[in-house]
Image (cartoon, rainbow, N blue to C red):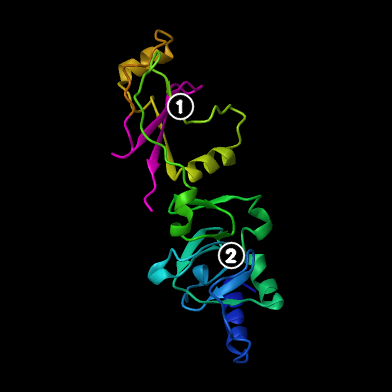
Amino acid sequence: MNKNTAFNKIKALIKSRSEYELSGTVTPSWGSFVICAFEPSLDRGIGYCVQIRKGRGAFGSNQVLLRHFDGELVNHENEFFFYLSDYETSIAKPFFKKSPSDEGDNPIYTINEREPEAGYLVDTVENMQCMYKEIKPVEIVREKGFFYHPNLPDWRESTPTDVINKWFQEHCLDRHVVMMDGDADKMFVDSWFEGDLDDCSPWNPTPPDEDAILLAIYDTEDGPCAWFGVPIPF
């Protein structure tokens, strides 16, 4: 059985359900396999739920993040879902590149690489605003070109990425990285890597957004690197 045949078989099975069995839901449970009532396409019609953002979708609907056959994470809004039965799930699962067990421990999900959130059921923005801790720009005083925002944690190379992502999420910031190599004057970059310089002050990292907050400029194996935080609007 190929994927298209499996999809059509599942749709036929659901169509044959009784009126009682056809009762759907707008809040699938975590890891449950569902079929979208209003999404006819094969690749985006069936998925398993990894996160629900309450009231953030169109017309006040939930944003339901489903993982689909190809492994892509897609946000569904103003949508209605039918749970797949155990038998229907057994038909669909072999065609999925990922399974709920692959999601990891408390992962952080984004929509179009923005709006990072952790957890399965995420509260409305209105109820979450008080959780965010505002980070403000400070006077930038660089020592040999390097800088560290006083509110940035003292992370080490061994700090897990999910810890860093969680901090940016809590402060409602998108993290952007700018490398000196590719952003600064080429002659200056060449002199740096030749070992002629130990002060990167002539390099002024290009902010990714007019509201971006400079959080750090530090050295790496690939040369100086700048971190910016771009506020995520509510």
Decide if residue 161 is on the left or right side of residue 188: right
Decide if residue 163 is on the left or right side of residue 142: right
Query: What residue type is disc 2 on?
Result: Cys
Residue 216: x %, y % from top left: 43, 27
Q: For the point 44% across and 57% down, which residue is it?
A: 125
Q: For the point 62% across and 50% down, which residue is it?
A: 106
Near-viewer residue (7 or 209):
209
Decide if residue 7 is on the left or right side of residue 114: right
Which secondary structure, mark 1? loop
Residue 67: x %, y % from top left: 56, 62
Which numbered tag is attached to residue 49? 2
Label 2 packing within 10 angstroms: few (<14), some (14-19), many (20+) = many
Rendered image quadrant of residue 6: bottom right
Q: Earlier in the sequence, mark 1 or mark 2?
A: 2
Residue, disc 1: 150
Near-viewer residue (126 or 29):
126
Residue 107: x %, y % from top left: 59, 50
Rendered image quadrant of residue 157: top right
Near-viewer residue (9 or 38):
38
Please tell me whether residue 211 is drawn above or below residue 62 in the rendered image: above
Which secondary structure, mark 2? strand
Q: How far apart are the alpha carbons under marks 1 and 2?
A: 39 Å
Q: For the point 36% across and 28% down, which residue is it?
A: 138
